[in-house]
Amino acid sequence: MGTFTGSFKGFGVTFAHMFRKVITTDYPFSPPKPAPRYHGRHILNRHPDGLEKCIGCELCAWACPADAIYVEGGDNTDEQRFSPGERYAKIYQINYARCIFCGLCIEACPTRSLTMSNEYELARDSRQDLIFTKKELLAPLLPGMEQPPHPMRLGETDKDYYLGALTNPGTSVGAERAPWAASATHDASEPEEHAARPETAGTVRREGAA
Amino acid sequence: MTDVSKRVDTVKLVIDGVEVTAEKGELVIRVAERMGIAIPRFCDHPLLAPAGACRQCLVEVEGQRKPVASCTQTVAEGMVVKTQLSSPVAAKAQAGVMELLLINHPLDCPTCDKGGECPLQNQAMSTGRADSRFVEEKREYQKPIHISSQVLLDRERCVLCQRCTRFSEEIAGDKFIDLMDRSSGEQINVYRDDFFGGDGTGDGEVGDGAGDVPFNSYFSGNTIQICPVGALTGEQYRFRARPFDLVSTPSACEHCASGCSQRTDHRRGKVLRRLAGDDPAVNEEWNCDKGRWGFRYATATDRIMTPLVRDAATGELREAAWSEALLIAAEGLKAARERGVGVLPGGRLTVEDAYAYAKFTRTVLGSNDIDFRARPVRATGSSTAITEEADFLAANVAGGTGVTYEDVENAPSVLIVGLEPEEEAPILFLRLRKGHRRGNLKITAVSSYLSRGLEKLGAALVAAVPGDEAHLLGTDPAVAAALSAPGSLLIVGERLATVPGGLSAAAALADRSGARLAWVPRRAGDRGAIDAGCLPNLLPGGRPVTDPAARAELSLAWKVEPGVLPGTAGRDVDRIIAAAADGTLGALLVGGVDPADLTDPRLAEEALDAVPFLVSLEMRQSAVTRRADVVLPIAPAVEKAGTYMDWESRLRSFGAVLKSTAMTDGRVLEAIAALLDVTLNTGDVMAIRRELGALPGSTAPNPAQPAAEAARPAQPAGDEAVLATWHQLIDLGSLLDGDQVLAGTARPPVARIGKDLAESLGVGDGDLVTVSTVRGTVTLPAAITDLPPRVVWLPTNSPGSTVRRSLGVTAGAVVKLSAGVPGPILAEGAVQ
Ligand code: SF4
Ligand code: SF4
Ligand code: SF4
Ligand code: SF4
Ligand code: FES
């Protein structure tokens, strides 16, 4: 008797779920949309002329509680200029085997060079590949941007870059969403469009491995 | 410690409500510091005279109308001081000063090298406001300007504390930088044209540099270290790292015999900078630029990482496994033992490694043919039978002279012979200068001219033609007068060995006058090598090889048969080279020796070519490794632990900075010895230290002082002159390879001639003069200097002036002089 009502109750739970909203995601065919301020992979932003915003100051590395960031500074010269001012990051690495996505580095960055994207597909099959360098972290060149090294195009000195900071958003606007996820985030300011999903570093590897 | 009984006048005062006793004349800021009260400050530095330049240290003193600067205020009986901790007035005053200092300070922290260890950052946090009320434009200067090839000045960041200028003027005596301009344009700068009515605009902007006097002080790095902001930075470390990602290790400088303690900072297996360590007994808080910046040699691309052996088939060096290379070395040395093996360990070894060489030579090779001296040890052309220097070292230096830096500072009078302190022992120079500045130290120098370094010491010159020093030490009344006061010191440099009778005369003079004698070599390992037994006449511990009792002591300690240790003095460096060149020796075992440093580089290279078997323990490719049969790589100073002995005989121990698999000389020698069935026990620094500590003190009587005849200088005739020469601090030495920015601060090489020679040659300042011997020529611009008649001075090993290699002679030799560049026949050779 008890057994019968018991199993009826159990099936009842299962049955009731058939009428609830499905939470299974169809990953990887339609990746879920993280919140707009989701802490994903970092981006090193650029000024509108393509120069790097990062000045190699290591403050992000200092702030990081997980010791995930490694920076080595270098001298900008007139012939080899990567950022406005005197200093740039010759080496910039974030180790995603260590990063806990706390975002303290973003708060520490004095130039707003370092921000976070929504990209969360960061699994790799080797520790070495989890260390992202400038190659992976730098924001893509948008139209009008020029691959550094090149001279300062937006002014005479680095001050012109910083004093005009308000009208100088660099790529932060677009790049804060993962390239493929521009349409996938809940961002009302963006027109919805369902373009084909572009490749990310992660998808490239996965498909290559298959 | 010793003067506990010395009565000092004391006063009682109250600081922050706590009564405290202080020495009369003490500064309030020091007393507060002793009590654990930190008063913010910028200009105050314990080793510099008080200046009161920054006003950050204001405190309230009861009865004073306004807050006073605690770094200039001396204590007084009954004084009541209130610091920022107990007085709102003091706190407000300090906050006000901080706000003023920050008005013009740029927002450079993220790119500034000082960020993270910056007193201004720290004190702005502790004493400053959280927000700025300043909305106007900040003062702007051209961003960093090179005030020397090594030092950069960012005037926007400067808080005008004058630590740098006070250091340069008071401590180093190099007044190359100063406050310039007035009011809000006041700035630190080097002397530039425009400040002296030149073609500049007077705005302090950098001109074309033509009239600039660069900040080429040998001690310029110290200003970077004591600058309380990031206004002075070094080219070499600029933007390389942040203090928080550096690992700091205490270390000892491997460059000279001054024995500076240092701090070596590294990151990811790479040394990024070195700072002066704080050792009040030795270098106080200073070091020289060579010690600070000369560390790139260890990462040079020609570093040898694997053993090399000469391939029998091709005759070329090829890489080999350690086991193979060690075996070849051991077998080669064993085969050569009969004919004799000469050992030249070089003067850059730690005491431990030097001891390993000494023990290896005695127990494995059964010989006394070992000499650490990689330099001329006697006058050019004099008989190699003369062992004056070795005898002098055995009698007067081995075991210690007892003279210390403190003695130098407090002596009434010092006589310097055969030594140019600023070039050859910079920290000794600073101590001499400290004594001189205090006004109680009289300095007399026997030298060929009054160099700038000697001028800065206020030295009286006893002018000597090179070669005449021995005679002067014996007879000159000024020399005798210089040592007449009790407690006087006689400081001789290693160069005196090239004056026949020089060291004998110095020892005799010390005996006669009662002055204490100190010997100052040039390299960091020289002093230690003597006591470690790297001389042909000395066993470890200063034991004479000829003393049977001393040999017996050592045989017992080393557990070897009594007959193993040979009882006659071996060959010294010149005789080892000669014996190798004429085919007498069966093999050479060479450490860090550059043949170009030896008396006759050409003969030395012939010897290296001629010797049947050559083993080289080296770090980098060199003239020796190129000729060697087996090359065994050894560790640079940063990758090993060890001990240097400075000129005072003080031990300067240090640990390894970088972890590496590179082996010390001692470990390599131990491995060779093991293949020859001898247990050397020198593989581990601690084991060597234990062994050295357990060696019984030498009971042998002190050997007799040398008594060589004082020679008179050579007599030049016609177009000849006598050569005077010594090394510049920053020159072509192999430990400075790869430091271009440092080389840029070297003294420009010149040939110094007196008025007489200038007239007879018809040259003026800056005209080219050629100095020649049968061997070759050196051509340099002339600098007319107050030299004795018929004396020409050349830097020993500077760009364009490699005296030993080009001329094949050393100080005291007769050379030919001519104006202009050499004639066509010589010129052809000189172009190469
Ligand atoms: S998000 Fe946090 S853990 Fe990750 S790099 Fe930044 S500071 Fe480090
Ligand atoms: S990302 Fe920002 S904080 Fe990090 S080094 Fe670059 S500028 Fe500095
Ligand atoms: S000197 Fe100090 S306060 Fe000034 S920019 Fe450098 S780190 Fe910042
Ligand atoms: S450069 Fe540095 S040490 Fe010199 S006055 Fe300016 S702040 Fe002081
Ligand atoms: S520290 Fe006292 S005035 Fe500068």
Image (cartoon, coloured by chain):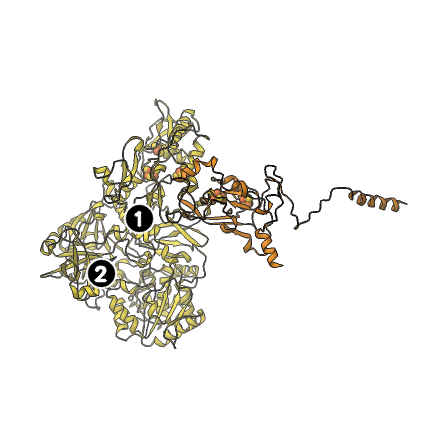
Chain colours: A orange, B yellow
| Chain under callout 1 | B
**Mark 2 or mark 1, whichever is nearer to me:** 1
In the depicted structure, whether residue A137 falls above or below residue B595: above
Q: Is residue B325 left or right of residue B805?
A: right
Q: In the picture, which quadrant includes the C terminus of chain B?
A: bottom left
Q: Position of residue B658 (x, y in %)?
A: 44, 55
User: Which numbered circle lies on residue B149?
Assistant: 1
Q: Which residue is mark 2?
A: B803
Q: Position of residue B325 (x, y in %)?
A: 42, 71
Dividing the picture into quadrants, the one containing residue B8 is top left
Q: Amino acid at mark 2?
A: Val
Instruction: Decide: few, some or many residues near mark 1? Use Cα within 10 Å; few <14, some 14-19, many ≥20.
Output: many
Taking depth in this image into account, of B281 and A150 the one nearest to the observer is A150
Q: Position of residue B828 (x, y in %)?
A: 20, 65
Taking depth in this image into account, of B464 and A89 the one nearest to the observer is A89
Q: State which image quarter holds ligand 3.
A: top left
Q: Position of residue A189 (x, y in %)?
A: 59, 37
Taking depth in this image into account, of B319 and B146 the one nearest to the observer is B146
Q: Is residue B290 left or right of residue A95?
A: left
